[in-house]
Image (tube, coloured by chain):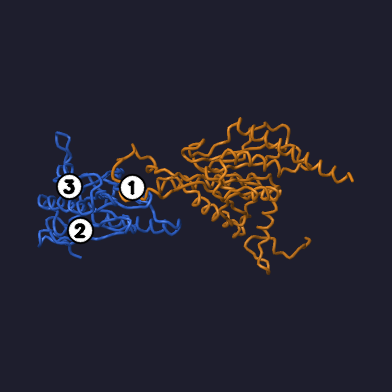
Amino acid sequence: MEFGTSGKLSEDGIHLDMDRLKKGEVNLGTSIMAITFKDGVILGADSRTTTGAYIANRVTDKLTRVHDTIWCCRSGSAADTQAVADIVQYQLGLFAMNSGKPPTTQTAASIFQEICYANKDKLSAGLIIAGWDERHGGQVYSIPLGGSLHKQPYAIGGSGSTYIYGFCDANWKEGMEEADAVNFVKEALKEAIKWDGSSGGVIRMVVLTAKGADRHLYLPDTDYKIRHT
Amino acid sequence: MTSIGTGYDLANSIFSPDGRNFQVEYAVKAVENGGTSIGIRCKEGVVLAVEKVVASKLLKPGANKRIATVDRHIGVVYSGMVPDGRHFVDRARDEARSWRDTFKTPIPTADLASRMGGYMQAYTLYQSVRPFGITAIVGGFDSELEAPVDGEVGRGPSVGAGGKNPDKKHGGPFLYMIEPSGLYWGYYGAATGKGRQAAKAELEKLDLKGGADMSLLEAVKEAARIIHVAHDDSNDKEFELEMSWISGADGPTKGRHVEVPKEIREEAERLAKELLQDSSDEDNDKSSDKMEE
């Protein structure tokens, strides 16, 4: 189903459409982010998936692997973003086999972008691609709704991100140590979860460095203080 | 209808009982009649050169190019049937273009060689086609720099590339040769066509893999000399030398595949002729030595 002409255009030129999602569609009303730090990148996300007001999944994993040290944060339609990530994972696997070396984050980001741009009318997918490769180190790319590609030192996305623009601007530093970087992501997401109704649940993170991928999990029961495995 | 031979050479896709594909071997014969092509890989870049036998005095000198650019950083030269070579180049350009479309980055030379090797191989399989009558030499320089994604606006943030290994080098010069069978290997120095034997002998004398590497300019001079050495004066009188080169970003071509500038080519050719003259003088001296007693 394509987007119809639902909603209404008000006098001030603002188009308001409460029914933008397809009927019954599962939405990742989300808080996601990815940052670069001294040794690589960290991706972080909340875990809430909603269908309208109902929480369809409270422990969702929005951090998806597309290659060993290239991952993405998904926001928007769960179905759309999973489908896109699946395609990219296949492409990168093929690329690695054919060329005999792991793909770069740029390669991954441009495959994502190609799909998001070519199908922009049909998709609702806001993605953050983050990865580590030997040549470029840690990199973060953001692909918002229209399918444009932005290389950034850090990126935030999803409905919860609106509440933490100021926090991130004030607290993100270039070349942070891993512990500080993990703490920064955690504090930012805690804030997003606190204020955003459609974000919540646990905090998940993935740390990507030369050593590979390392998963973190923090539960609200302990105020996100203890790292679980 | 007369029947000559075993019949195993009548079509692609049929092996002879001893495991040969005669059509491919005939294609190699076509290559062996073509003007000599060579490629030299040195640390600073790659040089491609070809001996263009002048088929007619009515052809405008320098007008008909035999070395083609496939992508900014990759060049191709070939010996054998020129129209087959043109088609090969067309296909190589398509491959380079489609790589850029999907990956937003220039195609690595190794990947282009692999794609084109696969393409040539496919022409040895089917009844409806014949193998390519060329052997192609593919030279390229994969950027040693961190390139932005193709079409990226601006340079992106300078901060935030953590966890890099600054000592590790990337990219560099590459040289491949693809034969009618689809076989391809990477080379330090490659030669094909009429004068390949002489050219290979000369290439082997050069120190191309040692630590003491020759400069790109020296490689240009050697390429000119080798094409002159490999040229057979008795059969083809006239020939034109065409040369191209590719350096890294800090070299003379700034990572692009371009024709060697006229002045440098002419100087290299002058030196080549001079050296050839000297060695033939020496030969004459030796023979006169023998005559004395």
Residues under numbered marks 3 and 1 in contact, where contact means CB atoms less than 8 Å apart = no
Q: Colour of chain B?
A: orange
Q: Chain of mark 3?
A: A
Please identify which colour was used for chain A in the image: blue
User: Where residue A116 appears, x then y in whole percent?
Assistant: 31, 48
Q: Is residue A226 visible?
A: yes
**Marks 1/2 same chain:** yes
Q: Nearer the viewer, residue B210 or A195?
A: B210
Residue on which the image places disc 3? A161
Q: Secondary structure at mark 1?
A: helix
The alpha-carbon separation of the residues under discs 3 and 2 comes to 15 Å
Asked whether, in this view, residue A8 is left or right of residue B121, the answer is: left
Which residue is under mark 1? A113
Whether label 1 touches label 2, CB < 8 Å = no
Q: Disc 2 is attached to a residue of which chain?
A: A
- Whichever of callouts 1 and 2 sits on the residue coming sooner in the sequence is 1
**Residue beneath the point at 78% across and 39% down:** B281
Between residues B145 and B259, which one lies in front from this camera angle? B145
Closest to the observer, A22 or A140: A140
**Residue placed under numbered mark 2 in the picture:** A204
Whether labels 3 and 2 belong to a single chain: the reply is yes
